Image: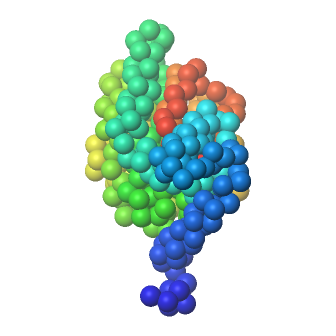
Amino acid sequence: MPIHSFSISNPCHHTEMAKLVGFLVFFTALVVAAADWNILKTRKTDNVELGDELKKYCESWRINVEVNNIRGFEVVPQECVWYVNKYMTSSQYKADSQKALEEVTLYLSSCCKLEGDGKDAWIFDVDDTLLSTIPYFKKHGFGGEKPNGTCLEAWMREGKAPALEHTLKLFHEIKDRGIKIFLISSRRENLRSSSVDNLIRVGYHGWTGLILRGLEDEFKEVQKYKSDARRRLIDEGYRIWGIIGDQWSSFEGHPMAKRTFKLPNSIYCI
């Protein structure tokens, strides 16, 4: 199909164009990278060695995202989209997530003297903490395309995001301890109904509050919006024993929880 035949009336229809552009960028990157020491300096005719060098670079990039050295990126480097795709759909991603949540269970076994007054609290993020957006990103470049809020919100409105099974189990374990659960999401208020329906449909129920971005939060950075939400909970007398999220913006700022637990996600950064 000729490039000029693609419709541009709806931003959600840019996927095919983006894939073509992504391929061209990726091809160009490989050519330029021959002189780029931090990606493919040792490029040789041996494709195995070339692949090993690229894999090392992409794993290094991913790890530095996870430890918050790389911040505020808009897209995954084109040469690493395949690697992020492979990781985020792998058994290693599941194992890494499960290990993080095992540490939550260990922490809860000894950390907390619960008062039983209804003010012990725990915070969960929603996307890629309770619900997975991987089905969406499978169709939208696995981080290799600039985020399109219109497309993503349309997908969220369908309410078809699957649960992250390891988090679902822990969610109910924490709730059954008598700890009040608050969900603080960067989703907008107009997605409340579809978000609640989606969460319940996949097995989440019994949370105390679902906090979404209202009009007054529209121009706040995510970190500021979430720290303000925590401040309101503290002012209401809640003790926040922990937070589980996949973005550093879920933890940063004051007041802080007593512990934070980061789940892996190198697809996007908010």
Does residue 198 appear to the left or right of 231 in the view shown?
A: left
Give coordinates of residue 57: x percent, y percent: 59, 42
Give coordinates of residue 204: x percent, y percent: 33, 41
Q: Nearer the viewer, residue 92 or 13?
A: 92
Compared to residue 151, the image places residue 80 above or below, namely: above
* Structure colour scheme: rainbow
Q: Nearer the viewer, residue 268 or 3?
A: 3
- The residue under the point 71% across, 54% down is 35
Q: Quadrant of residue 219?
A: bottom right
Give coordinates of residue 225: x percent, y percent: 65, 45
Q: Nearer the viewer, residue 193 or 258?
A: 258
- The residue under the point 56% across, 22% down is 259
Give coordinates of residue 194: x percent, y percent: 39, 59
Q: Evaluate whether residue 10 shows in this view.
A: yes
Does residue 72 appear to the left or right of 267 in the view shown?
A: right
Compared to residue 114, the image places residue 241 above or below, namely: below
Total numbered circles: 0
- The residue under the point 40% across, 12% down is 109
Compared to residue 98, the image places residue 266 above or below, namely: below
Compared to residue 127, the image places residue 240 above or below, namely: above
Q: Quadrant of residue 240?
A: top right
- The residue under the point 52% across, 44% down is 49
